[in-house]
Amino acid sequence: MIAMGGAVGTGLFIGSGGALAKAGPVGCLIAYMFVGTLVYSVMVSLGEMATYIPVPGAFTAYANRFVDPSLSFAMSWIYWFSWAITFALELSAAGIIIQYWNLNLNIAIFIAVFWVIFTALNLLPVSFYGEIEFWFASIKIITIVGFMIFAICIDAGAGKQGYLGFHNWVHPGPFAPYLLDSQGATAKFLGFWAVLIQAAFSYQGTELVGIAAGETDNPRKTVPVAIRKTFYRILFLFILTIFFIRLLITYDNDDLLSSASDASASPFVIAAGLAGVKVLPGLINAVLLTAVLSAANSNVYCGSRIIVGLCTEGLAPQFLAKTSKEGVPYNVVAFTSAFGLFGFLNVSAGGTNAFNWLLNISGVAGLISWACINLCHIAFMRALSVRNTPRSILPYQAPSQPWLSYYGLFFNVLIILTQGFAAFIPWNTAGFFVAYVSLILFVVSFVGHKIVFRTRRIRPEEADLDTGRREVDEIVFEEQVPTNALERLKNWI
């Protein structure tokens, strides 16, 4: 539920409308399905490693153990920064969403209030965080399921437009041209590729299952189940939502290209407006608020655990890893949370540009992490092979390996390298640096760390497959049986 809460957010509720405008209904659906296969390759790769060696920071530790300490350093700090700055984004977005009901309210008030609330929540024992995320995620999932039922009714003729069927897929067409002033195949392919990149950003957060593995009760049993449930349920929610939105709205609808950040830009609301339903915008805005607050809660948790993993691997100052009696790393929570104060940049017009640059640095970090997870898994399998350790003894075995990891690695790298293609049509220097500044920082961090610390690639026979695994092997976990209906429901979910 933590991973589902992190992945299902404003990217689906608001950003999916822009995806429809770029690629059309069929192009958009194919793009989301294709990226879903990349997510699957990442999830199963991470699942195999995280169940065998469930350690804090998860894939950041695996890069240090199996591939190269410099790769771990560069990937981890860029990934951490993305979560820290996204925390500032979510705080700002919460204020903008609340302004939907009253434009006279200053968003600085809500940035300050929510910053205090979520910093305090993350200083509590991790069980409180998990409980809050569970209910936040549940609200979003119920909303999406409700929208699907609503969409079926409207498509069947319940709205003022009458029966729709697949009319919007035929008129104005299944694929939309993008960037080029043309209706040709190249322009339509660019639309598909632009949505491919956007879909990758929308799916980010599914890897949070691996980050939480080090604090999970009985990870050998629970993490594989979580990996499977998370992927299939997120794919189900995303694909069906994208499918139904495309049934109800044409890709040339002017409202899809709105720059608003509240409910007025949501394709859910646009679809309701076209159907003649007037009560939905306020409800969707309230759900958007819970989605943003859920993401803010996840940002601090995940960012702090990434640095805990870095401390464990000797790649961050050790004082940051100090914990309370309940095991909460309070120093690193405070450090990560402090970056949420960048949200105040949005209060002034001049600070908005600087804030947008910071956000663009974080944009590609998730894709870099996905590629690194696939690479770590390839190295992990090589280490097992050198030790003559059969994968059959692993608590969870990723299917179709090693080909699935190579498949994910290739296309994740391809998307990273091409995600700024719009800056080339026509050439836009500022747009180029905005798109690729995160990749540049990643390369500079990797090369700089390697030069300073003179690290070398980890050979398969040198890979550490024992630290963190033996400790878990020696623990005897007690099976927790649900005692009431609510606990049984949560256990089933």
Image (cartoon, grey):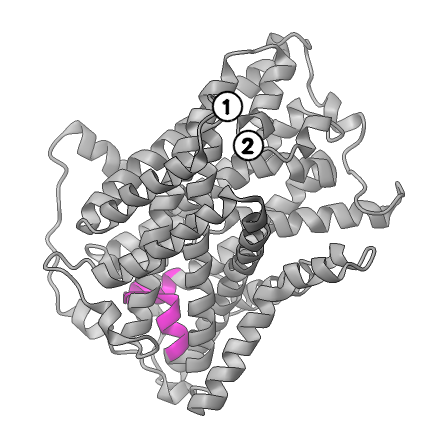
* Front residue (pair 26, 110): 110
Please state, as top left, top right, bottom left or bottom right, where the N terminus lies in the image: top left
Magenta span of residues: 47-64
The image quarter containing residue 385 is bottom left
Q: Residue at x 36, y 83 (%)?
A: 463
Q: Is residue 147 above or below residue 199?
A: above
Q: Is residue 461 above or below residue 12?
A: below
At label 2, the amino acid type is Thr
Q: Earlier in the sequence, mark 1 or mark 2?
A: 1
Give the x, y percent position of residue 199.
59, 47
Q: Residue at x 44, y 28 (%)?
A: 105
Can residue 14 be seen in this snapshot? yes
Give the percent coordinates (x, y) of residue 237. 49, 36
Which secondary structure lies at badge 2?
helix
Marks 1 and 2, Cα distance to the nearest angstrom?
8 Å
Q: Nearer the viewer, residue 245 or 296?
A: 296
- Assign a secondary structure to mark 1: helix
Q: Horizontal and vertical percent for residue 378?
A: 48, 74
What residue is pinned by disc 2?
Answer: 241
Rendered view: 488 above or below 350:
above
Residue 157 magenta: no
Tag of residue 147: 1
